[in-house]
Image (spheres, grey):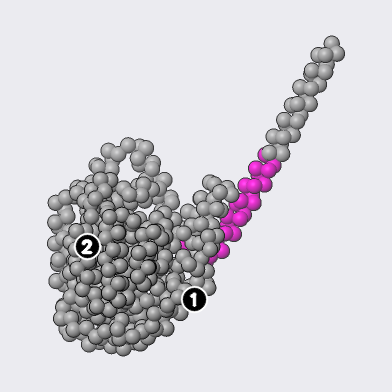
Amino acid sequence: MLMQHKTVRIIVLFKRSVGMFEHWMVLIVEFVFIINTLAAILTVFRDRYRDITAIWAWMLVLLLFPIVGFLIYFLFGRKLSGNHIFTMQTQQIMGIDRIATNQQQEVLSVSDPEHFVEEQSFIRLFLQNEQAIFTNQNEVDILTDGHDMFEKLFSDIRAAKHHINIEFYTIYNDKIGNELVDLLTEKAKEGIRVRVIFDSWGSGGKNAKLYKRLRAVGGQVEAFLMPRWHLFSLHVNNHDHRKLVIIDGNIGYIGGFNVGDQYLGRLKKFGYWRDTQLRVVGDGVLAMQSRFFTDWNATTKNEKLEFSENYFPSTNASGDVAMQVVSSGPDSDTRQIYQGYLRMISMAHESITIQSPYFIPNSAIMDAIEVAARSGVRVRVMIPSKPDHMFVYRATEYYASVLAQEGIEVYAYDKGFLHAKTIVIDDKIVTVGSANMDIRSFALNFEVNAFLYSQSLALKMNNIFEQDLADATLLTPKYFAKQSGWLRFKYFFSRLLTPIL
């Protein structure tokens, strides 16, 4: 009996201990939940310039992943500090502002001003937002194939006489990446000034080994903004997504191509790589140069670049393309390229053609597209048929399904991977550049696009789109209805994260 009594007592005490433990654990969990919720609210709502959709997306992350969510936010969610913004903006004191001021009068000197009324509104918008230089008489070639693009690029680099300035999101340490560095090393040995900016995130690290031979002969290589930031202050969510090459201040490349073997169709995962790059000869190159100067001076601790005629020479181009080079990034709340995209879609009268590998627009862009379609504007959107980033692609599918339900033509490019970032409206205004049709490009990445005002160029771009249709599939509501419930769940869930993808 005594043993039984002791056993019962032990069991009772054990149950009480377990009960008290459970009670305290519940209190601790409740406390952590309350503190986590309050901290999440204070963290994401304190920035009055952050888009409301991004606020709620980050709230979802912070609440679903207590404590861990704050580490994710620390690395990916914080905006650039005021000090970094100020530092980057002050790089404009190179005389670039004088070029913009002098060329603002070009808006009023365009021939046939009645035909150019809508274009003038764009020109004023970008001059007001960013002092984006307006230039006439540019010669512009459209490059859509990686082999053609790198062949022309390497040929122009071989002919360089004074300097080669390169800025890419991705320069991989692979075959084409090494071919580029080998060529730049040869030019540096000749005394040509060679400068390279790359994004360490996009390029898979700083790749010191890749650039060792170039640096050894005087070439200068910088990872965008990395030298200034320590690990724990790094904003890994803000990438230098720009793709620019400027050679002797006379020839410029701008568009969607990076440097890597996949851009030549050498990776089985992607197959043929369909992209769009522009080769520009004319004063439009001066605007690309000014963008590179700003990024270089914001990044390097060493030699700062200053305005000189060697870098901004007089050009004698005789083309028929007017253009502005427009930049945007987290260093500004204006979101210049986004405003340009929105205005293009809103002002279209007859047609809109869009190509983007990541189609994740915000509500304003979606509304503008749907209003245009309902107003009789023919809207056509082309996206890839395969993913390179799973969540991003599933979110793209979601928005594609919404457009298809509205009767808008949405196509999936089947030949390979579509990476082009282009919009054409009414056969007269074109934009080509690095900015995707997604919230990341609108607000998080550093981007650069050319906005071009030329009927002949617009017709060429639309002809290229028509050719792409031969290798594309129309995505109808029936196509999306046949998808599995699990697949639809994935792109509905991905949509919730679109503001921070």
- Residue at 56% over, 49% down: 68
Q: Quadrant of residue 367?
A: bottom left
Q: Residue furthest top?
A: 1
Establish if 262 lies above or below 49: above
Which of the pair 237/370 is nearer the observer? 237
Establish if 12 lies above or below 37: above
Which of the pair 274/112 is nearer the observer? 274
- Residue at 17% over, 61% down: 148
Q: Is residue 446 rendered to the left or right of residue 59? A: left
Q: Is residue 286 rendered to the left or right of residue 328? A: left
Tell me where residue 34 appears, x and y as whole percent. 64, 49
Q: Kindly identify which residue carries mark 1.
A: 86
Name which residue type carries label 1.
Phe
- Residue at 25% over, 63% down: 422
Which span is picked out in magenta? 26-52
What is the crowding at mark 1: few (fewer than 14 residues within 10 Å), some, or many (at least 20)? few
- Residue 349 in view here: no
Establish if 274 lies above or below 477: below
Q: Quadrant of residue 94?
A: bottom left
- Residue at 57% over, 59% down: 43
Magenta-colored stretch includes residue 304: no
Name which residue type carries label 2.
Phe
Depth check, mark 2 against mark 1: the one in front is: 2
Q: Kindly identify which residue carries mark 2.
A: 150
- Quadrant that contains the N terminus: top right
Tell me where residue 372 appears, x and y as whole percent. 26, 62
First in sequence: mark 2 vs mark 1? 1
The dominant secondary structure in magenta is helix
Which of the pair 235/57 is nearer the observer? 235
Q: Is residue 235 rendered to the left or right of residue 123? A: right
Establish if 402 lies above or below 111: above
